[in-house]
Image: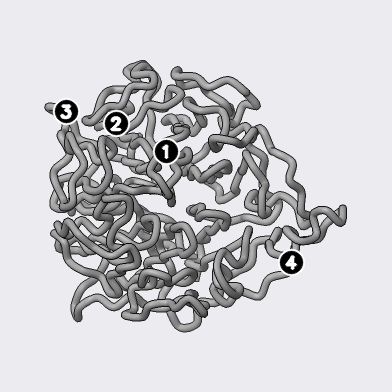
Amino acid sequence: MAIVAALGMVAVTGADFTDRGQFNYRVTAEGSPPPTTPPATGNGVPSQNFSNRHSLARSKNVLYGWGGGVTTGTGAGSQSLLPVVMPSGTTFTEIAAGPSHNLAIDQNGDIWGWGNGLQGALGPAGNTAVSTPIKVTATSTKFRKVAAGGYVNLGNGSVNTGTSFAIDTNGNLWSWGSWNGGMSTAWTVLGDGSRASRSTPRQITTGIDFVDVAAGWEKNAAVTRDGYVYTWGSNHYASLALSDTYSTSAVPTPTRSPYLKNIVKVAFGGRTAYAIDGEGFAWVWGNKSPTLGASTLGGASATDCKWSSSSEQTTASAAVCVPARVPRGSNPPYTDISAGESNVYVLDAAGAVWSWGGNRFGNTGDGTLGTIANRDTLVPTKAIFPAGIKVEAVVAAYFGGVAVDTTGGVWTWGRVGMTGTNLLGDGRNTWGDQDGQLTPKKVK
């Protein structure tokens, strides 16, 4: 049965803002067209870059932030959920959380941002750190989708780069911020081949109707309305899905993958990429084992990359160049996907969360904890929520997950904290460096 992306999680008005990607989206059977406005639950989580030390979630029309510093939007870092300081008279219809900054689109199609404005990621604010939302754009061009990327050294919390992307109401792709993907890299990530950072949004595509964009560390992807995927940036570990032969060459501008079709969403982990298609299946490519075993594959049967020179053989043999479909078994169709540093979450049509990959801190959410000898969950495994809980949206944090249920309850699990920051938002101020929350815990 074919399925198509529909809307979810956020109340929005106006036809320009009814594309998939509003916080998150559901998938419905073909023949049940998307409504003209999303369900008015006011619940959801933003699209999110894997290397975050902060999180955002929306419950009953209130946007909450927690975790590290100015990126929470609450005015300061917090060990528990606090409301984001919203501009008067403004409703955010779309939000993207990046490693060091966040972006949002309001009801008028203008872009807002907060956090660290490195290399112009927050537009006119320059390199200023902004603790509450400020307007990035206020022009005749209106936008319907944003993504926030960049790099943060999570070992010491230092912020290095920030890159921003947006899709306007005509489907054109825009970018601004840092031109390179990391502190010591030379990959061009803005999508126009530029080697100069900029604070002014610039249109980088014309004539392609993009509906979704995903930002990773050094690599990015955008999905067209007809399900094709364009990628650009670093091809380290074959994360761009452009060839069956491994190459470290940078791809400076959006280039269509010959393998990815009928795709509705792409998500980037640390070195692995994922997608879900219109049939509700997950796909995976890139690095196949960030810890032990082929854990990022989720049981998919995949072929190692070919290589053209012996110097690339070691890396190529650890990567999958051609996307492989993850077996779903009897699970309902997957409707959303989000990737963390070494694991990934999918949401199914029945409201259950599944995960595979690294489980060092209980990332899977099934009550187990990976050991030093075996930290991985090899196949999609269901997270254990209390009976009767149906999840409406899920997103991966650095070493764990955040979910919002259909009643507006906010749940977190995985690594408790790092570098003085409570990642769960459960209010505790002390924890061990290796402490993990093994099943979802309600924090709001």
Q: Residue at x 26, y 31 (%)?
A: 106
Label 3 residue SS: loop
* Residue 120 located left or right of residue 9: right
**Which of the two discs, 3 and 4, labels the residue nearer the N terminus?**
3
Q: Toward the viewer: 208 or 121?
A: 121
Label 2, label 3: how far apart the Cα atoms are: 12 Å
**Which of the two discs, 3 and 1, labels the residue nearer the N terminus?**
3
Label 1, on which residue? Answer: 148
Which of the two discs, 2 and 3, sits closer to the camera? 2
User: For residue 33, what is the image quadrant?
Assistant: bottom left
Q: Residue at x 67, y 46 (%)?
A: 235
Going by the numbered disc 2, the residue's amino acid type is: Trp
Label 2 residue SS: strand
Q: Toward the viewer: 16 or 270?
A: 270
Above or below, comparing residue 427 to residue 367 in the picture: above
Q: Is there any visible trace of residue 165 in the rendered image?
A: no
Label 2, on which residue? Answer: 114
Mark 3–mark 4 contact, CB under 8 Å?
no
Label 3, on which residue? Answer: 87
- Point out which mark residue 171 bears: none
**Which of the two discs, 2 and 4, labels the residue nearer the N terminus?**
2
* Residue 106 located left or right of residue 192: left
Badge 4: residue crowd in 10 Å (few <14, some 14–19, many ≥20): many
Label 4, on which residue? Answer: 304
Label 2, label 1: how far apart the Cα atoms are: 11 Å
Label 4 residue SS: loop
